[in-house]
Image: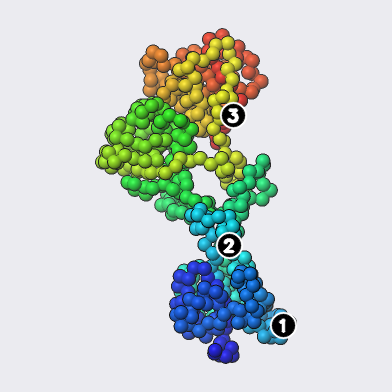
Amino acid sequence: MIPETHFKKTALLSVADTTGIVEFAQGLRDAGFRIIASGLTAKTLREARIGVEDVAEFTRYPELCGGRVRLLHPALFGGLIADRKDGDQMRSLDREKIPPIDLLAVTLYPLSQVLEAGTLSEGEVVDFLDVAGAALLRAGARSYHHAITLCDPSDYAPTLDTLKLGKSLTLERRKALASKAFTYISYYDSTIAQHLKAAVVAAEQPDEMIVSLKKATELHYGENPQQSAALYSWSGARPWGLNAAELLYGKPLAYTHLLSMDHALELAAEFQAPACVMVKYGNPAGVATTERVGDAARWAYESDPEGCTGAVAAFNREVDAEAAAALSHEYLECIVASEFSGEALTILRAKRNVRLVRLPSLLASAKESDLKTVAGGVLIQDKDLPQPPGQFKTVTKRLPGELEKAALELAWRVAKHAKTHAAVLSNPLQTLGIGAGQVTRLDAVRLAIVKSQERHPVVPPNSPRVLGCDGWISPQEIREAAEHGIAAIIHPGGSSEDKEGIAAADEFGLAMIFTGRRHFRL
């Protein structure tokens, strides 16, 4: 072994990811570093014939608990933390013959990938919870004034380039590396916290919220060209939702496409029968549900051809040749479904400027939360989950017929996903007019009626028109609806004007349902 006095500095290496570690260690040796390494790292370096000192040899302490605590030793932490400018601290190191550690390189067990794979038992997962490595990174990052801390193999080469010149890294660079290390530890710890929390159903929002995200896709820009953007995934979670999407054809997905896809898929998932949902700029433009996917595609677009032009279309079934043919001559930004038949792909790939996206499973997670950033913080709420129709209550003298019930359920589901104030006119199979994002509910109702009259001036027999609203409506809106041929209404109820509203509905012979649940969406 080369005498300690031969070396100018000391490096401690302990990596789960051995990418580039051999070249890095050799470069450190060439720069005059004494190398201390543990376990797999030491073995890898010895196989590459690089001089290395094992941690147990350095600390003069045997391994315990199968090597799980080999790195938890004062000789290592003292060498990292000791303040080089504090004489008492440095003398204490000399007294114990502990050399200062000038460089630390640690990569932790790949916990996120292990959890994403979902192949290990809970007990096996625990073995991947790195204790000592994370503690060393924290100690090294804390000591950025005098130590270099690395947690990413991509930083090895730039660091060596400086050290080989006999120079020290600048304080700014060491500080940046320390920040990266703390971020790395935080991500790791948050992954653990999120994994353990997944099994716990809380009745209220926690006092402290940990959010750990990993960049999944860099996007060209955000809502506008001047805004940078990226899609992130929850750390440690198996890919699902938009992160599991596969682009089968077309240009890369943009920020606005992903937002519209999210809205469209969430609404499509609420239907049991085949459904097609078209969303444009965050609002439903046309929705249809029927027994045949092709009919759903055609009727969704025909519900509002002008509004659906340039929309994102989502299906809750495989897109077949009939559905593809129905949309083959329409301009759509994106079509997303769980699967496309071979014939459908052939038909749709002939279209220009369309993106075809396969998503193995529709969006559904009862435990997920809604997060919205605001000035100085984040607003967090539970997801607004679908409501079973069995909770609905008819409050008028006249009961809705079967066709009216189907139309009311469709209108209610769509109103839930339109921006407040929202009003939706529909028949049993398709939306007829959608008024969304209005400052008053009367404006929303009037807009929905106008759209319905323009797009669908002829009312087929046995096709009742109904109205659904995301919040309670007043007698004025009920009269407005009745005067324009609306046969039935569905809304939450619960206002001080409920009695007057019910009386107005009875006066015009309307059927009206209270759902007891509001669905505002901002």
Residue at numbered disc 2: 127
Task: Name the amino acid, label 3.
Answer: Arg
Query: In which quadrant of the rendered image does the C terminus lie?
Result: top right
Query: In which quadrant of the rendered image does the N terminus lie?
Result: bottom right
Asked whether residue 27 appears in the rendered view, the answer is: no
Q: Residues within 10 Å of mark 2 (few under 14, many from 20)?
A: few
In this rendering, the label closer to the viewer, 1 or 2: 2
Task: Give the quarter of the image for residue 495.
Answer: top right
> Tag 3's secondary structure?
loop
Cβ atoms under marks 1 and 2 closer than 8 Å: no
Residue 338 in picture, x, y percent from top left: 40, 40
Q: How many marks?
A: 3
Mark 3–mark 1 distance (CA, rounded to whole Å): 67 Å
Residue at numbered disc 3: 518
Task: Name the amino acid, label 2.
Answer: Asp
> Tag 2's secondary structure?
loop
Whichever of labels 3 and 1 marks the residue nearer the N terminus, that label is 1
Mark 3–mark 2 distance (CA, rounded to whole Å): 46 Å
295 shown above or below 264: above
Frontmost residue, 124 versus 276: 124
Whichever of labels 1 and 2 marks the residue nearer the N terminus, that label is 1
Residue 433 in picture, x, y percent from top left: 44, 24
Residue at numbered disc 1: 92
Frontmost residue, 446 versus 370: 370
> Tag 1's secondary structure?
helix
Residue 345 in picture, x, y percent from top left: 29, 41
